[in-house]
Amino acid sequence: MTNQEPEICICAAVVTTEGKVYPCRRHSDGIMAIRSNQETEAPHPEAQGFLTSKNRFVSRIEAYKLQGEAGIPSASRDGYYPPELFSEDLY
């Protein structure tokens, strides 16, 4: 029997309109990094989420579920806006 670690969120992440993932502490940091690159990329309006311990990008809703399944309470009392995870919920 293997003891598999639960998948958890390790940091916030923002995806560009071209599909590039920017890991960040806060979603706003990722958005600012994308905009400062002065490339053709722009933050995708609906692609704010998290990178997991399995290096997957997940939505805010899936991230909230993963944290709950792993037994990790939100840093904020019940999460800022359940059923979505926010970067503030990690710290």
Image: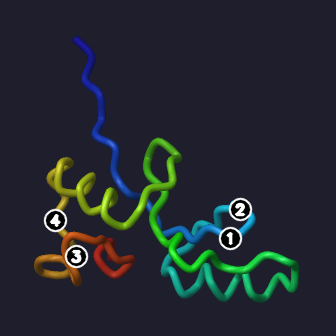
Q: Upstream in the sequence, badge 4 or badge 1?
A: 1
In the figure, residue 90 lies in which quadrant? bottom left
Q: Which residue is mark 3?
A: 75
In the rendered image, residue 11, in percent from the top left (x then y), is placed at: 46, 65
**Looking at the image, residue 54 lies above or below residue 48:** above
**Residue at x 14% of width, y 53% of height:** 71
Q: Upstream in the sequence, badge 3 or badge 1?
A: 1
In the figure, residue 65 lies in which quadrant? bottom left
Q: Upstream in the sequence, badge 4 or badge 2?
A: 2
Q: Which residue is mark 1?
A: 16
Give amino acid for label 3: Ala
In the rendered image, residue 70, in percent from the top left (x then y), is placed at: 20, 48
**Residue at x 61% of width, y 79% of height:** 30
SS for callout 4: loop
**78 displayed left or right of 34:** left
Q: Which residue is mark 4?
A: 73
> How far apart are labels 4 and 2 at the CA level?
29 Å
> How far apart are labels 3 and 2 at the CA level?
28 Å
State the mark number for residue 51.
Answer: none
